[in-house]
Amino acid sequence: MRHNKVLVTGATGNVGGSITARLAGTTTVRGLSRRPEALPDGVEAVRGDQFDPDTVARAARGTDAAFLVWPALTADGAREVVEALAAHTPRIVFLSSGAVDDSVEVQENVIGRFHADVERAIAGTGVEWTFLRPHGFATNTLAWRPAILAGDEVRGGFGRTAVTLVHEDDIAAVAVKALLEDGHQGAKYVLTGPELVTRADQVRLIGEVLGRPLRWVETSPEEELAAARRWLPEEVARAFVAGLARSAEQPVPPTRTVEDVTGTPARTFRDWLADHADDFR
């Protein structure tokens, strides 16, 4: 059974925007965003805050499936939003996190903890659900843009840490399958790129695409933590740096989930750079 009307929350974000673009022209799409003017033509636009249960309920009425993203660093208020969503749509595809660990009852990682809380809230409603659990987003490398615009060096810790950066459009491709098709209910899809790339090599590859050499300058773990504190709350900053340290010794291996679900191999980091080179200029 194909679903005919789909709600996308965060419809102008990296993943939500890609989902919306893929769905437009294929099915009826309703996009919830604080910037509905940025939505493509043909999308039913709903202006509002996705953290507001009343707004979410209004946007979800009459839909057959919904994509939920939770762009917050706690699960505060998530249960009310999830219940509002589940009251009006029978299927939820949630952008969770690869930090969620099903082998433990209490998540040690704060990022995994609040995503697991949202997952439990969704599962508790009784709707059909699919959880997408991506690891490192390729878009996270845009954090280096100011340094790249300013010079030829990127400073950071754990340059030898290798991660599997996933293209946001690959996450969207899996989400669209789960939104429109049956057979994905109850799935917890761990999504990665197809290769491990060290942080230092990520910087080098960005330089290759830009046509100028970029150099990774290694800093201490303490300096990396201080830098993370400038854009993350303390507990999340510590979790981020601890994850880098852990991945230096035990990197998360690539999965084949994107290809298994969509039939198309996941894009490499070089592929992502080909799509985003101008973002670093």
Image (tube, rainbow, N blue to C red):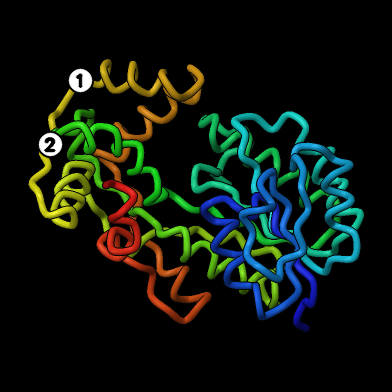
- x%, y% of residue 271? 30, 65
Q: Is residue 236 left or right of residue 162?
A: right
Residue lying at 42% horizontally and 49% vertically, measured from the top left: 137
Residue lying at 71% horizontally and 66% vertically, measured from the top left: 43
Image quadrant containing the N terminus:
bottom right
| Disc 2 crowd, CA 10 A, few/some/many (<14, 14-19, 20+) | some
Residue lying at 23% horizontally and 29% vertically, measured from the top left: 156
From the viewer's perspective, is residue 95 above or below residue 268? above
Residue sitting nearer the eye, 130 or 17:
17
Residue lying at 51% horizontally and 53% vertically, measured from the top left: 14
Q: Does the CB distance between marks 1 and 2 fall below 8 Å?
A: no
From the viewer's perspective, is residue 187 above or below residue 116? below
Q: Which comes sooner in the sequence, label 1 or label 2?
A: 2
The residue positioned farthest toward the left in the image shown: 213
Give the CA distance from mark 1 to mark 2. 19 Å
Q: Which residue is mark 2?
A: 152
| Amino acid residing under circle 2 | Asp
- x%, y% of residue 82? 80, 46
Residue sitting nearer the eye, 196 or 230:
230
Q: Is residue 100 left or right of residue 201?
A: right
- x%, y% of residue 39? 64, 59
Q: Which residue is mark 1?
A: 220
| Amino acid residing under circle 1 | Ser
Rendering quarter of residue 221: top left
| Disc 1 crowd, CA 10 A, few/some/many (<14, 14-19, 20+) | few
Secondary element at tag 1:
loop
- x%, y% of residue 198? 21, 46
Secondary element at tag 2:
loop
Q: Nearer the viewer, mark 1 or mark 2?
A: 2
From the viewer's perspective, is residue 228 above or below residue 170? above
Q: Is residue 101 left or right of residue 161?
A: right
